[in-house]
């Protein structure tokens, strides 16, 4: 009695993994980059709020901007506009791409604006 020849599937899982692994790594890097962008956006919002509150309570504009720059993503621009009744702080920053496979992707600009009413300093 002759047995039919069995094709061996040994090594098929390794070959499939070798083909899929670069895609899994690319997706993981993309998700990490999106998390970095989200975290930078949250930091920009916090920086704008902190700057507007400091300027509204009467701190010097330079001190308020310095406070915002400490909170904002690295390299961000912080500006303050005071129109008498309210203070507006704007933070604009840039998040670079993750490099590697995504090296050609442009960076993402994050921005935030916060408004605070000027506090009356008289008793």
Image (cartoon, rainbow, N blue to C red):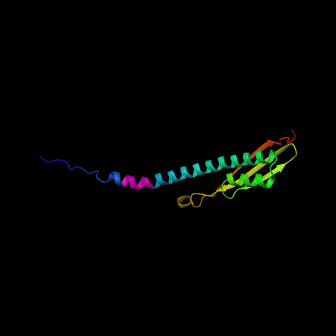
Q: Is residue 110 left or right of residue 28?
A: right
In the depicted structure, whether residue 95 falls above or below residue 83: below
Toward the viewer: 64 or 104? 64
Please identify the residue farthest to the top as the structure is shown: 123
Q: Position of residue 35 (x, y in %)?
A: 58, 48
Range covered by the magenta-colored residues: 15-21
- The residue at 54%/49% (across/down) is 31
- The residue at 70%/56% (across/down) is 76
Q: Position of residue 98 (x, y in %)?
A: 57, 57
Q: Is residue 5 left or right of residue 23?
A: left
Residue 33 in magenta stretch: no
Q: Position of residue 65 (x, y in %)?
A: 76, 54
Total residue callouts: 0
Toward the viewer: 44 or 62? 62
- The residue at 57%/61% (across/down) is 103
Q: Is residue 97 left or right of residue 3?
A: right
Q: Position of residue 29 (x, y in %)?
A: 52, 53
Of the 4 image quadrants, the one containing the C terminus is top right
In the depicted structure, whether residue 98 falls above or below residue 54: below
Toward the viewer: 107 or 61? 61
Q: Is residue 121 left or right of residue 12?
A: right
Please identify the residue farthest to the left as the structure is shown: 1
Looking at the magenta stretch, what is its main secondary structure?
Answer: helix
């Amino acid at each position: 009695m002759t047995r039919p020849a069995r094709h061996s599937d040994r090594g098929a899982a390794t070959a499939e993994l070798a083909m899929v692994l670069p895609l899994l790594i690319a997706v993981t890097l993309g998700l990490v980059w999106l998390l970095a962008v989200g975290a930078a956006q949250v930091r920009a919002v916090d920086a704008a709020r902190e700057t507007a509150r400091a300027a509204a309570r009467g701190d010097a504009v330079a001190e308020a901007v310095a406070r915002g720059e400490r909170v904002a993503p690295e390299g961000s621009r912080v500006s303050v506009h005071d129109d008498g009744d309210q203070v507006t702080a704007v933070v604009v920053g840039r998040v670079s791409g993750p490099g590697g496979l995504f090296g050609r992707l442009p960076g993402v600009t994050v921005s935030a604006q916060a408004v605070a009413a000027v506090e009356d300093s008289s008793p």
